[in-house]
Image (spheres, rainbow, N blue to C red):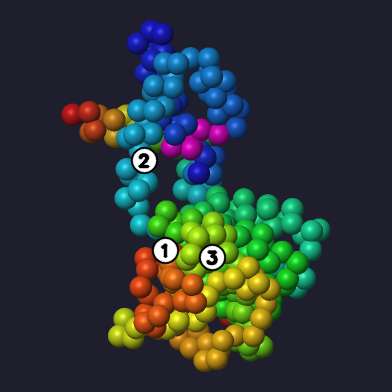
Amino acid sequence: MTTQEREEADILAGEYVLGTLAGAERARFEARLAAEPELRVLVDEWTNRLAPLADALPAVEPSPEVWRRIEAALPPRVSAAVAPSLLSRLGFWRWSAIGGALATAVLALFIAFGPKPLGDADHIVVLNDAQGKPAVIVVADVRTNTVAVKQLAAAPPAGRVYQLWLLADANQPPKPIGIMTPAAAVPHAMPAGLKDALPRASGIAVSLEPPGGSPTGLPTGPVLYHGPVIALAH
Amino acid sequence: LTHEELATRLEAPLGTIKSWVRRGLLRLKGCLER
């Protein structure tokens, strides 16, 4: 490569990492990337330069209005036939700054509760692990007093259970609301008091506890997953 | 966002956007290598 070719390749690598290089230009660059190790070095350099900038940007949280619009856009009944249009919608969300977290949450909802209409829920909680990966999804409908808890994370270690906690606010201790079981993924009646407490709660957390749950009424093991309560407007 | 999407959003010609991105990348590289 001449100096000029190298400069040109360096800019292309920057645009490639930045994501502005698209279409045929991107395909051409990717083809060169496979054949030219020098380009791979340039791409790695740009990744190292740009990644800290992406990390420094604040996360963009979807507003309640976005949830309302998603709901309005969803068909009343979810079936296999609507899946492709949902995926194309997700393409839009990924493209917009709202991005990954929301797409993941919506996608996880459909994986977890595919045949069940989303219109039956008025509160959802996506509990993430320390890496931000969804681990547990809680879908609740306080109007009908039903709740379903879907576990996406691996099963707890032998001799331990996952216990769910309702986080009211900073001034109140977490309230135990149940032990996670595979059967909880099927919509069932809410534990007593949850119907009134859930809409006012800030979030739900999961801790690792001995069989039967924490003996003290407060989490005794590590809090592994947590997420905010999201109210869906109806 | 691609060059085309940036051009639409910022209502600027595609060539201008490409040149902005190019200048920005060069300056960023210059800053980080100093």
Asked whether A165 falls inside the magenta stretch, the response is no
Task: Tell which subunit mark 1 falls on.
Answer: A
Res. A189 visible in picture: yes
Q: Residues within 10 Å of mark 1 (few under 14, many from 20)?
A: some
Does any portion of residue A71 appear in the rendered image? no
Callouts 3 and 2 close, C-beta under 8 Å: no
Look at 68% across and 52% down and name the residue there: A88
Which residue is found at the position 49% from the left and 56% from the top?
A133
Chain of the residue under label 2: A
Q: The N terminus of chain A is located in which quarter?
A: top left
Tags 1 and 2 both on a single chain: yes
Closest to the observer, A16 or A158: A158
Identified by mark 3, the residue type is: Val
Q: Quick one: SS at disc 1?
A: strand
Residue A121: percent from left, percent from top: 64, 78
The residue shown at (48%, 64%) is: A159
Which residue carries the number 2 mark? A51
> Magenta segment range?
A18-22
Vertical position of residue A10 compared to residue A181: above or below: above
C-alpha gap between disc 3 and disc 1: 10 Å
